Image (tube, grey):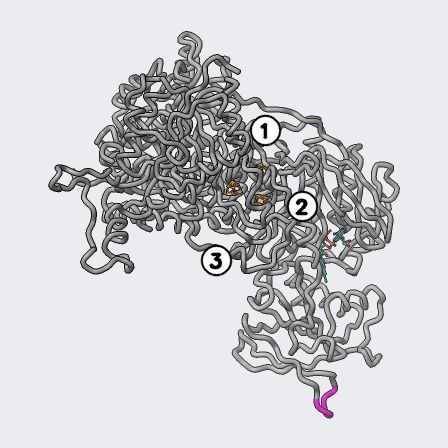
Amino acid sequence: MEDRRIGVYVCNCGTNIAKVVDCDAVSDFAKKLPGVAVARSYKYMCSNPGQEMIIQDIRELSLDRVVVAACSPRMHEPTFRKALQTAGINPYFLEMANIREQCSWVHDDARAATDKALALAHAAVRRVVHHEPLEKRFVDMCPATLVLGGGIAGLTAALELSDAGQPVFLVEKDDHLGGNLARVDLTAPYLDSARDMLADRIRRVLESPKIEVLLRSTLQSLSGFVGNFRAEIRVGADGARTVDVGSVLVATGFREFDARRIEHYGYGRLPNVVTSFELERMLREGRILTRGGRVPKYFAMIHCVGSRNPEYHGYCSRVCCMTALKYGHEIKSALPGAYVYDLYIDMHAFGKGCEDFYRRTAEMKTMFLMYAKGTTPEIVPSGPDDDCEMLIKVHEVLSGEEIEVPADLVVLMVGMEAREDAADVAHLVSISQDKDGWFIESHPKLDPVATTTEGVFIAGTCQAPKGIPGSVAQAEAAAARILGKISRGKIEVDAVFAEVDETRCSGCRMCNELCPYAAIEYDAATKRSRVISAVCKACGCCVAACPSGAIQGRHFTDRQIFSQIEGVLEWASSQG
Amino acid sequence: MPEKKLQIALYWGAACGGCDVAVLDTNEFVIGVGFLVDIRLWPIAADGKYRDVEAMADGELDCTLFHGAIRNSENEHLAKLLRRKSKVLVALGSCAHLGGIPGLANQVTKQEILERVYLDNPSIEAGNRVVPLPSTRVDAGELEIPRFYRRVYRLDDVVPVDYYVPGCPPAPEQVKAALQALVNGTLPPARSVIGASNRTVCDDCRRRKEEKKVTRFHRPWEILQDPDRCLMEQGILCAGSATRSGCGVRCPDSGMPCRGCYGPAPNVIDQGAKFVSAVSSIVDSKDPREIERILGDIPDILGYAYRFGLPASLLQRSIR
Amino acid sequence: MGFEPRIVGFLCNWCSYTGADLAGTARIHYAPNVRVIRVMCSARVDPTFVVKALAEGADGVLICGCHPGDCHYSEGNYKAMRRFPLLGRLLRDYGIEEDRVRLEWVSASEGKRFAEIVDDMTERVRRLGPSRVKTLLEADRVER
Ligand SMILES: Cc1cc2nc3c(=O)[nH]c(=O)nc-3n(C[C@H](O)[C@H](O)[C@H](O)COP(=O)(O)OP(=O)(O)OC[C@H]3O[C@@H](n4cnc5c(N)ncnc54)[C@H](O)[C@@H]3O)c2cc1C
Ligand code: SF4
Ligand code: SF4
Ligand code: SF4
Ligand code: SF4
Ligand code: FES
């Protein structure tokens, strides 16, 4: 350890660092530290000549460790690692000291900033001594994919993958494919038939030699890691299948909000208060009747049932507004003399073609009544003189008036919510749920179909409420991500992960439940725990917890961090 | 029988005498050893005067088993003396190894101890409340008693130690093994811990280990325990996971949680901090208030986490 | 010169360290007393790091992680949250003032918040004065 040959490079970053930090003082100080063979201060370390300088020094002075005191490692760590690699030494032999973002840019007292830079450089030198050579590894990628859920999202992904020649296991809980869309009649905003859309996809799925459809099936357990999962599936009442897959796509969809929860709408009690899904059924069957068998004349759609209300769900379910407009069209074309009232909070008509659709609906004389967020329209039975089943009282926001409208059929636009078994699914495949129960993507904007568990993807409404275009787009995106991995053939395993030293593990199982990725396996026979390195993301939680000191976090070892602690403090104390 | 008997001493610093008993508990073995060794000093079992030790040549003793912590100047003086006279110095038991139970006194100051013991103690008669001074003049001259130190130290805080045999007290079998190794000349490399494994008590503990998620901590007597299941999983604070194994799982096998007397696992530099880390990690809650409540069930965490090793902890003593 | 606290900061890579970087990019100035050590997640912070820092002479220790629910590793910060109360009690028993060790949540966009925390902590520690740990331990060695 003591005979390391460390090179220390202090970047001036033009004047970004040098105008506050005395860079020469930092390099002069570093020169005197044990193990440091060379220390230089230079205008732009990340420039080509800067990197060349490091590479040349490594080669000519046989440096074996490098410290770069410069900008944030989040900025240029990859750059300098590459330089080390080019020079022929392990890229992990690098440590950076952040003397720009966390020093020269935030302090103006030159003396204090220089002191801090010295301390950080000192810590980096102390740490780098303990850096170990780390190698990236590769494991084989199994080309098969497990798709959970046979709704429009699952079907689309399965086709996309099988069209590319890759095997798919499509696991559907229900006894048929199609999911919630199979309950829908026409679709907004272009009024094309859900049945046609689905029928074609389902046929292709069933005919594909690459797709094995498992109906009435559920996932029982998932072990392994990206490229190498093993799934136990229960098929039907007592069948079982074990399949090996490289990726998992979760497309388990949503369930509708239970309208019974909002008691005063009287759903379940008042015979002619129905949900959107029930109206869909009537539309599909072409028979729109009241419970009493009468053809209704007055229709009222109430929006945001269970959505955008903190008592139930705070979010917008995204499809209900357009679905309600769609009902306007469908009802008017089935029953030209009918009156349609649309009771909404805000008309959310985002998305391609939707604003036009709204305009067309308004032209068809759907009557829009706006009620205030936080209030609910009131449904009361009609009197003997009324020619309708019910009356709806609403405080209409735009006119400011209390309005009463007649209704024979009240349609509750029920929102979407996470399925009752979403938590179980999340647990099985090691992904997380947000506060509303939707599965969480790896990044809401930049990585919307991946999850924090590598190899597990999400698509469709299980991620958040959305319509068909969004569900399909996500399914295709997920399929593309999976195909990308398959085409590479190998999975790169990051060199930074936690490792259990079997000779020190006591089998106490303290660590077993801690891993967010379930990367820790316990072997009951040997009484030892083991980290599956390909699954570990190196958070270090288990490392901190293991009371036997048996787990090592590569590149974040205790020894390395202790040296940094000593480094920042020892230097300071030597200054008095 | 070897030509020359091994010359050994056993001595105690601040200790309860349990380690002496552990040596005696090796029964016939210690008697057998008696044929192979000369015991030159063992205050609890044999006669011997300090001046006899002083008269020895440096290195004359083959080995000293030193148990007990360093609490006063006499402890330190003898430790240094025996160190000089011995080829091998062994820290026997938790007190010499880590500071032991006497080390818990590092939570309070010297002043507080003296006041409590000599002034505030209700059993002291009025008029008799005096704090003894290190030296007193009497007619016959100057009388001296050892100076009471500011705090408790481990043996290796005052002299270099060759081997450590942990335990409060060390398991007799381990004492035996250490003596045997000494007699046979098969001691491991210097400065190692002997009579203990590289793993922790859980490794040898027969209790079944399952899912560790705790929502409530209990004192051992508060619940009816499942004798076959890990105590920690039943909410009984057991230090076994953070304690080097070697005792033969004495406590959990007797229905009591391990208290940590064998000290930290080899890679761990602070037993208590590591124990705190492990224990808190298995608390099953994400709600700060509930977490506080669950952990609030644990009394006296400092005393628990460092019951046998406060002077060996990174912070060593309370900061007052 | 007056007393300048020496504070060791442990910042998780994904939120807090990024937040601290953001303070830099936004040129938000703050006290130069915290020396940051980057860890991948606040869950990596072993209580041993804290006692080690205090034993090495730190006047304070600041641990920062993502806000609850936002940890890059989904729940690491809850583990940090769980470790903190017991560690806090341990340190209190050691006689270390509460203000010397602090756990805070700082997101990647909260450069300003990071700066405020550092300033506030520095002030509080300054008020407490230098930590006596190292001096005492050294004195214990010189005169028993
Ligand atoms: C009334 C109504 C009308 C709508 N109209 C339109 C419209 O006009 N235009 C539009 O774009 N969108 C519309 N939508 C939205 C559309 O229905 C959804 O976007 C679409 O159904 C989402 O598909 P999905 O595959 O994500 O989920 P789902 O359709 O919910 O499919 C999920 C599938 O997974 C299965 N599954 C669930 N859990 C498991 C499990 N654990 N294991 C195995 N299988 C499981 C389910 O049985 C189901 O088959 C409407 C929604 C509603 C409520
Ligand atoms: S916490 Fe450490 S000793 Fe215990 S099972 Fe896990 S790796 Fe093994
Ligand atoms: S370091 Fe984190 S991700 Fe890796 S095994 Fe440990 S807890 Fe799991
Ligand atoms: S924690 Fe205690 S009871 Fe549980 S396995 Fe370890 S030693 Fe045995
Ligand atoms: S179980 Fe623990 S406290 Fe009991 S004797 Fe063994 S090591 Fe010591
Ligand atoms: S990554 Fe920031 S706290 Fe876990």
Q: Mark 1 points at which residue?
A: A503
Residue A443 placement, left or right of A271: left
Mark 2 vs mark 1: tell me if same chain: yes
Subunit bearing disc 3? B
**Residue A470 in view:** no
Report how many numbered discs are placed on residues in the image.
3
The x, y position of residue A343, in whole percent, is 63, 72
Subunit bearing disc 2? A
* Magenta range: A383-387
Which residue is at a point 50% across and 22% down the rendered structure image? B35
Mark 3 vs mark 1: tell me if same chain: no
Of B77 and A276, the residue lying toward us: B77
Q: Ligand 4 is in which quadrant of the figure? A: top right
The x, y position of residue A503, in whole percent, is 59, 28
Q: Looking at the image, is B92 positioned above or below residue A457?
A: above
Q: Looking at the image, is B288 positioned above or below residue B2?
A: below
Of A139 and A324, the residue lying toward us: A139
**Residue A140 in view:** yes
The x, y position of residue A348, in whole percent, is 60, 61
Marks 3,1: beta carbons within 8 A: no
Q: Residue A458 carries which label?
A: 2
Q: Nearer the viewer, mark 2 or mark 1?
A: 1
Q: Which amino acid, by three-letter code, is at mark 2?
A: Ile
The x, y position of residue B249, in whole percent, is 57, 41
Local secondary structure at mark 2: strand
Q: Name the residue under label 3.
A: B297
Residue A89 placement, left or right of A253: left
Find the distance from the CA under tag 2 to the CA under tag 3: 41 Å
Residue A479 placement, left or right of B86: right
Q: Earlier in the sequence, mark 2 or mark 1?
A: 2
